[in-house]
Image (cartoon, helix red, strand yellow):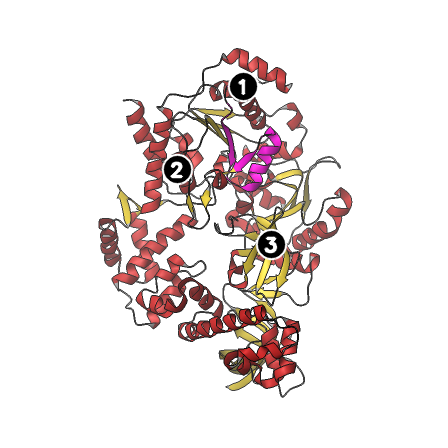
Amino acid sequence: METLVGYIENIVFTESETGFTVARFRIPSQKDLTTVVGNLPSVQPGETLRCVGKWKSHPQHGRQFEINSFETQAPSDVLGIRKYLESGMIKGIGPVYAERIVKTFGVDSLKIIDENPEKLCEVPGLGDKRIDKITSCWQEQKAIRNVMVFLRGHGVSAAYAQKIYKAYGDNSIVKVRENPYALAKEIFGIGFKIADGIARGMGIDNISPLRIDAGIEHFLWELSNEGHTCFPESDLTAQAAELLQAPSDLIAERIEALVKNGTLMRNEDLIWVKPFYLAELGIARELARIMQSPCRLRDVHTEKALEWAQQKLNIQLAEEQVEAVSQGLRKKALIITGGPGTGKSTITKAILRVSEKISSNILLAAPTGRAAKRMTEITHKKAFTIHSLLEMDFGTGKFKRNKDNPLKCDLILVDESSMIDTLLMYNLLKAIPSEARVIFIGDIDQLPSVGAGNVLKDMIASQRLPVSCLKKIFRQAAHSKIIVNAHRVNQGQFPDTFPSPRSDFIFIEKETPEEILETIVEHVSESIPKKYRFHRFEEIQVLSPMKKGVIGGENLNNVLQQKMNPNPNPLIRMGRSFHVNDKVMQIRNNYQKEVFNGDVGRIMEIDLSEQSMKVSFDGKLVPYEFHELDELVLAYAVSIHKYQGSECPCIIIPIHTSHFKLLNRNLLYTGITRGKKLVILIGTKKALAIAVRNEEVKKRHTGLKDRIEEILQTELNK
């Protein structure tokens, strides 16, 4: 084994999940840069490392140093110190001030910042405000380094050490020692695996109740990320035993203990974490409350109202639309479901127009900002996101509108209801006054919510709520091959892949993933913007069924970023590369920033000296500190699931048998219906046929249907 000491000049590549990194390394005594490879989670340009490893020869990239272990050190030469200071690790110092500080103090620069920060006033241009910022950040970095030394001994990266410090401050080490498993619950990005590694390093036993209880609860929360609100107890026992490498009888014993202390809930053979159990029970009870209460809106003469609405809107409603509007003017709660082109928007406008004649207290809502914006455009009435309607307190993450402070409305229309997950639906229903009418509008054949549950489908399946199901495609919509082919796919029929030259639906046959990738890149960057005049950032979206592989989301994003927005010196944080102007997506709800899972924006500014980045979401600038960047991913290509509820003028979908596990009708249908003006499928007919034939959708374990059946049966029959 050999030892190299130097600093990171730049990061070439980092794998976000494993931490595997390729970097260019500057050894002060050598003229040329050295390529180093190895597991270097979250190291940054400018960091000085002492690396232990061996030399090897790569067939393509030549001589490299393969790192077995490393430790960070303070830089000792002028070049290393300058690189460290300009890396953005210390707020207030960017490339300009780094050069001035080093020019003023040379190799003593870090010592001055640490021991005599008042001398920084000797640096040209450094004022008191910036010096205070540098000093406080340096002290924070010292505290973080102490936490880092403790955590890196347990395999935790510098970036996560910073997150832990931001959450717990000077109590970080104490908190971690008390219960390392709390990290997995309380800090985004730190899962059970990392917490378990820390715990095992601290000597916590494999069969400790602390470990087993945390593992069981973690497993159920992970299942909620797959859409389950509950899980069969026998499967939970077996799978948790495998995950935790612990005896099944011990798992069963701890499940029983967690049920007894109220952490978990049991109903027959299903187990819930408490919040989901209470939410499903609450949804059923709130629906019963609304449905059995009298309506504040006065009755209207339905036939006359329909005639008046059609005249005012200059439309002619079909029979099933007439029935839907009639129910919307009579029922306390109603679900309207149908695919594209079946007239959901027309029905919404008709119900709204009539209801506005008898009440001014009408609210429109949708789960996402994009869906709310589209609802506003259709109805010419302001629609709100559910979060803003419920007046979320972005400091606490709780809603100000609730049972004790209900919404002021006589009618609420909720669009894109298939996207509403269990917890959000419960909070919405709690805030709807008993005397109000509620109408849920959505497409039941689209993918279910990103969050846990299958709420709209369960509400319909319970057969306790009135449902208006729209099936007829109207003449104007029938001219769109997007709509026609979406319905063909939904009915298990192969889409028309031989359309006219001016068609809005195109299939391009390519056999290999590499050919598909090349075609996507060429179409996004060249062909489509030239031929259709679509803006390649704002009006074209690639949707990929999978994350991994040549045409998976990760690789598509990397290739499209290099083609459309190249930058020789990207910001690399949390294993991700960011450039100014990159298209990015938020991947978790952040109530403090008022941005939510699935929101797409553009990077407007990266400030190394402030360790911050600004992203524009629909014109609203949102700041991020560098340690928060694991909340963002590139969005040149996104998953179909993440894009539900959104629309884009042009949608491109790769479809290949390498995505075999995820090729199903539901996914393809949802992807196609995201396109407003043009949908392009690129791939093989075999893969397309597999997707069309495959009706199987991964089952979500939920208890909502049963709760609605039980409670509405009891309450409405009183």
Nearer the camera: disc 1 or disc 3: 1
Which residues are drawn in magenta? 357-384
Amino acid type at image mark 1: Lys
- Quote the CA–CA distance across marks 2 and 1: 27 Å
Which residue in the protein does label 1 denote? 357
**Marks 1 and 3 close (CB-CB < 8 Å):** no
Task: Residue under label 3, please give it.
Answer: 615
The residue under the point 41% across, 66% down is 169
Is disc 2 placed on a helix, strand or loop?
Answer: loop
Give the farthest residue toward the bottom. 29
User: How many C-alpha atoms fall within 10 Å of the one at disc 1: few (<14), some, or many (≥20)?
Assistant: few
Q: Is residue 376 magenta?
A: yes
Q: Position of residue 705 (x, y in %)?
A: 36, 34
Against 356, residue 303 (above or below) is: above
Q: Secondary structure at mark 3?
A: strand
Q: Is residue 256 above or below residue 281?
A: below
Asked if residue 473 can be seen in this view, the reply is yes
